[in-house]
Image (cartoon, rainbow, N blue to C red):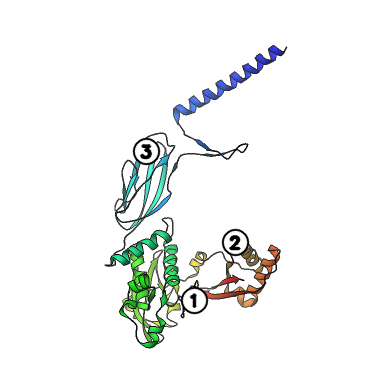
Amino acid sequence: MQKRGKVRRKSVLLRYVCILLLTALIFGASSPVNVYAESAGPGISGKIQGPAMNSSSVTLYAGQTKTLKVSGAGRTLKWSSSKKSVATVTQKGKVTAVGKGTATITARAGARKYTCKVLVYQAASGSSKVDKKIQSVIRKKIKAGMTDAEKVKAVHDYIALNCAYDYSNYLNGTIPYESYTAAGVLLKKKGVCQGYAEAFLLFMDALDIPCKMISGTANGGGHAWNLVKVDKKWYHIDVTWDDPVPDKEGYVRYSYFLIPDSVMDDDHSWTRSDYPKCTSGSDKFIKLFGSVSKTTDAAGKNLAKQYRKGSRTLTLIAPQSAYRKNSSFLFDAVRKMGESLGISVGRYSYRMTGYGSYIIFTVYLS
């Protein structure tokens, strides 16, 4: 009886192996698939992964190259570029950045395809030092998958956080020439409105985002700022006035970030016939700063979520209508955050700025 049992088990096992081999032959003949397992350690099941490209997005300056690879494809790849004026690719996967813009590089293996988005930028300020600085900042701050609005915000924030208005020289009437230039803003980290606007313009040009520099007046004096085109609409952006004076480390305002004529003309004047109209509101960009909390309960949960991730500088966005109904909106939200976390929130400070129909609070926990 024991021998018969062993024979039966061997017979069942043999049939099972045959079925597996037959299945592999059938599917392998029509569509070969290479799969590899990522070991997760003894006694733990691993994660199965299919073929993949080594990069899903890359940022390159004109003339730079990058070789893309697809691991585990198992067959010859056919490479192509969606826009050869931006980036080309050889049949070995070597990508060459040609001109400003965005292109998609595709590798095909039979019916399967693998893609990588390529952003190409090109700085052309006339100064090699300024160009190198722009290239360095873009390489660190800009990713190929970003929207134009996200790129604009990244540049706006970089300039405001890394440059200080040359206030002492302004008060003394001794502003040096360099402070009026992009070189002063980017290399010396000191500047006035013209330098801020020129630096922003150079970044937008490098990223192939339409941008203009406006020469007008503000507070009764000459002033310069920018217009930038995002999602086919023009907006005002004044990085100078979004950078606090005197300088406050780590703090950026957004009062003049992607706003329409109707808001800008409250304290800025310009010859409107010389520039495109800006008629679209700012509310569509509020998600660039985080999620909106319409109630104090939702706000408390949002703040608690940021706290759990380790942040002690928290962002709270609320509709102005909610704040008008409850002037203690922020206080209530912080209290509910503490209740949610089971902690007692001691002293904290905050800054607030209006943006469209919203208020952005930045909360600093002690």
Which one is earlier in the sequence, the residue at label 3 or at label 1?
3
Mark 2 and mark 1: Cα distance apart in space: 23 Å
Q: Residue furthest left?
A: 126
> What amino acid is at disc 3?
Leu
Mark 3 and mark 2: Cα distance apart in space: 43 Å
> What amino acid is at disc 1?
Lys
Mark 3 and mark 1: Cα distance apart in space: 53 Å
Q: Position of residue 33 (x, y in %)?
A: 47, 33
**118 vs 255: above or below:** above
> What amino acid is at disc 2?
Gly
Q: Residue 248 bears which disc, if any?
A: 1
Q: Which residue is mark 3?
A: 77
Q: Residue 338 bears which disc, if any?
A: none
Q: Quadrant of the C terminus?
A: bottom right
How many discs appear? 3
- Which mark lies nearer to you, 3 or 2? 2
**136 vs 280: above or below:** above
Instruction: Please state which of residues 173 and 284 is positioned toward the viewer in this rendering.
Output: 173
Instruction: Please state which of residues 165 and 143 is positioned toward the viewer in this rendering.
Output: 165
Q: Position of residue 69 (x, y in %)?
A: 39, 42
Q: Are marks 2 and 1 in contact (CB under 8 Å)?
A: no
Which one is earlier in the sequence, the residue at label 3 or at label 2?
3
Mark 1 packing: few (<14 Cα in 10 Å), some, or many (20+)?
few
Q: Which residue is mark 2?
A: 310
